[in-house]
Image (cartoon, rainbow, N blue to C red):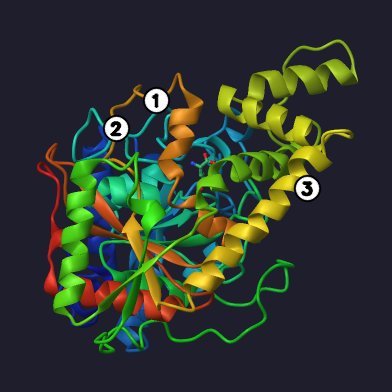
Amino acid sequence: MHDKTISQLATALRDGEFSSVELTRHFLDRIGQHQDLNAFVSVDEENALAAAAAADEKLASGNADPMTGIPVAQKDIFCTEGLRTTCGSKMLENFIPPYNATVIEKFIAAGAVTLGKTNMDEFAMGSSNETSYFGPVKNPWDHKAVPGGSSGGSAAAVAARLAPIATGTDTGGSIRQPAALCGITGIKPSYGRVSRYGMIAFASSLDQGGSMAQTAEDAAIMLNVMAGFDERDSTSLAIDKPDFSASLNDDIAGLKIGLPKEFFEDGLNADVARVVENAIDEYKKLDAELVDISLPNSKLAVPCYYVLAPAEASSNLSRYDGVRYGYRAPEYDDLEDMYKKTRAQGFGAEVKRRIMIGTYALSSGYYDAYYMKAQKLRRLIADDFDRAFEQCDVIMGPTAPSTAFNAGEKTDDPVQMYLNDIYTIPVNLAGLPAMSVPAGFGNDGRPVGLHIIGQYLNESRLLNVAHQFQRVTDWHSKTPEGY
Ligand code: GLN
């Protein structure tokens, strides 16, 4: 059962091959067997089985939707009513939200079954899942390797087939980079496509929820559920949502693929370059055209992001003060001391580093030099993409500069860690949609992702381009040994 995609599972459920309760039980058992991966922070057996039973009734009545009875793992950044939501932090270790995020509401309305909440870097800050208060996640392809981050639990869960699909969020690469490192398919939609209501905020102008799945076809089915206008999120786009599955089979002959020279320069591992070049050759066989392009400001994206994202984070995280909800230090002298001790004890090192950088960048006297400057760079980076898309339909390159690195390898050097997102971050700054698609393996046997960047709001084209690749390759259906 666990090797099936959700489009196959939906057919099997409708044909009565097995029930949603049986399917859910199967995944719950797998989660139990593979606890050493540490992919889940919370598992909700009782409610999962109840939701599955309700789905079975709906299936029996013949009114099933594509998501009816499908088990899904939710990143622990989405608020779930009555189910602990930690965001990977001690600060929210015991937080039980009184409401559901819009994304969660939509999955419930579509008849999906929530298996549990997946592990993640604390407040989504990280590229290796090593900043989680709940411990690191292992990469199912090689337990010595990190799964990527911050949606590392979701990526590991899908790769190990502990869940057929999972949600993720992507502020600077957190869907695409772990998808690449774990050999699965992930899409970050255009900014504003998916509601951020009830999605715990890191950097609000960059955060975007999206899908993590085996295939582009499944990612499209998920996006059909997740996307759409939400008046409770002021940056949600009030536009019609297409059927993201409708154009998967469109012909891509004549597709113009832009190859930015900056994405193939120094810093890119030769092994990853080889796999990505082979993937691009597959597109040539499908009659796509290659166009050399340049994104000259993309090298400024990482420093630009590491001013803007911490600035927004320092403001967003000021709400964790020990007063309203979340952790409160057990002992303190007065109110001010309570704030200080609560935040000192409740946040981990990376989160504190970001709050300090962000507070500094926003302080009077430095604001113009850092924050304003970074905002201007952000515009230049977005303009580069606009110019590039005059010459091509999609942009391709590697998702990450290397395959999964070993746990502990970059924890002492934050700059090295930050550079793992060098190709993904420009996309968030420009608000564009992008995917990572399994494209092969490095000599170390660890997966490599092909990064495909689309034009603003053109997720349908992106999914189409990815799906056509998956029709002629089988990298997406490979599973790690032992799973
Ligand atoms: N790794 C990046 C960071 O640490 C991106 C994280 C994300 O997309 N949430 O900020």
Which of disc 1 and disc 2 is earlier in sequence? 2
**Mark 2: which amino acid?**
Phe
Mark 1 CB near ligand 1 (8 Å cut):
no
Mark 2 near mark 1, Cβ–Cβ under 8 Å?
A: yes
Q: Quadrant of residue 345?
A: top right
Mark 2 to mark 3 CA distance (whole Å): 34 Å
**Mark 1: which amino acid?**
Lys
Mark 2 to mark 1 CA distance (whole Å): 8 Å
Compared across the picture, whether 327 is left or right of 71 comes to right
From this view, report whether residue 229 is shown above or below residue 338. Answer: below
From this view, report whether residue 128 is shown above or below residue 413. Answer: below
Give coordinates of residue 23: x percent, y percent: 24, 62
* Mark 1 closeness class: few <14, some 14–19, many ≥20 residues within 10 Å: some
Give coordinates of residue 337: x percent, y percent: 84, 15
**Disc 3 designates what residue?**
372
Give coordinates of residue 90: x percent, y percent: 58, 28
Numbered disc in front, either 3 or 1: 3
Q: What residue is at 24 percent from the left and 87 percent from the top?
A: 253
Which of disc 3 and disc 2 is earlier in sequence? 3
Q: What residue is at 28 percent from the left and 28 percent from the top?
A: 406
**Disc 2 designates what residue?**
405
Mark 3 to mark 1 CA distance (whole Å): 30 Å
Q: Nearer the viewer, residue 454 or 219?
A: 454
Q: Which mark is residue 410?
A: 1
* Mark 2 closeness class: few <14, some 14–19, many ≥20 residues within 10 Å: some
